[in-house]
Image (cartoon, rainbow, N blue to C red):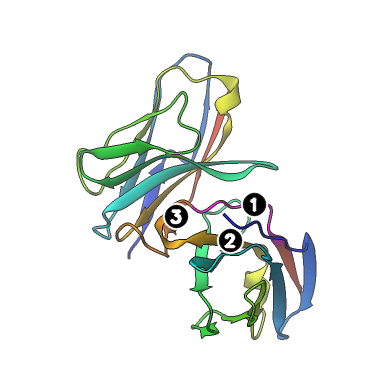
Amino acid sequence: EAQVTQNPRYLITVTGKKLTVTCSQNMNHEYMSWYRQDPGLGLRQIYYSMNVEVTDKGDVPEGYKVSRKEKRNFPLILESPSPNQTSLYFCASSPRYPSYEQYFGPGTRLTVT
Amino acid sequence: DAKTTQPTSMDCAEGRAANLPCNHSTISGNEYVYWYRQIHSQGPQYIIHGLKNNETNEMASLIITEDRKSSTLILPHATLRDTAVYYCIVRDQTGANNLFFGTGTRLTVIP
């Protein structure tokens, strides 16, 4: 089944403790991105990657890092999480850039205390 | 990017057509209209998109007015599983991979 997977789905952590949220797609898509969703603010793009070893900042990149060493994986790294990074995170992939259709993962709900 | 205006919420009886309107009066010539939906806390799901012509796929139909200032998403036979937040997004093709999802329309399908 074609899909985007994220792990973990739920995470509660403390301020400053480094964490990684994994994202993987099995559709051989070139383009991958991370969004966060907050009430009243909609979905906002954090980082994106047009292909392996090519990443760039989205609209809200502060406090996040990403890497794209393999085509299928695009992990999101929070080096020193803070409470304002408490949010619902989605990974998405597209066949190419530009592409009208994005495939989203199931989401990761992160709480930073 | 053109701003969109959607009703906050709508109800629809199960089995009936759901018509979701969207106003985008400042749309420019090279901007597409995209529709996505999000079922409670799941990842958004692509539905359909169009530029100026009406479009239909297995999920829905998209009707765009001739002046392109508004559009309507039609779910022909709504089911309970169509209960979701529906987002109308206007963006040019180069921005298709970074669509701004605002507040959308919360559609509730009633048995």
- The image quadrant that residue A74 belongs to is top left
B101 or A10, which lies in front? B101
Q: Which residues are magenta?
A: B99-105
B59 or B66, which lies in front? B66
Q: Is residue B57 left or right of residue B40?
A: left
Give residue A75's position: percent from left, percent from top: 33, 36
User: Which residue lies at the image location 55% right of the left edge and 54% below the top edge?
Assistant: B42
Q: Chain of mark 1?
A: B
Q: Is residue B104 magenta?
A: yes
C-alpha distance separating marks 2 and 3: 11 Å
Dot 3, how many residues are within 10 Å of its Cα: few (below 14), some (14-19), or many (20+)? some
C-alpha distance separating marks 2 and 1: 8 Å
Residue hosting label 2: B89
- Residue, far top: A16
Prevalent SS, magenta region: loop
Q: Is residue A25 left or right of residue B52?
A: left
| SS label for mark 1 | loop
Residue hosting label 3: B95
At label 1, which amino acid type do we have? Gly
Residues marked 3 and 1, same chain: yes
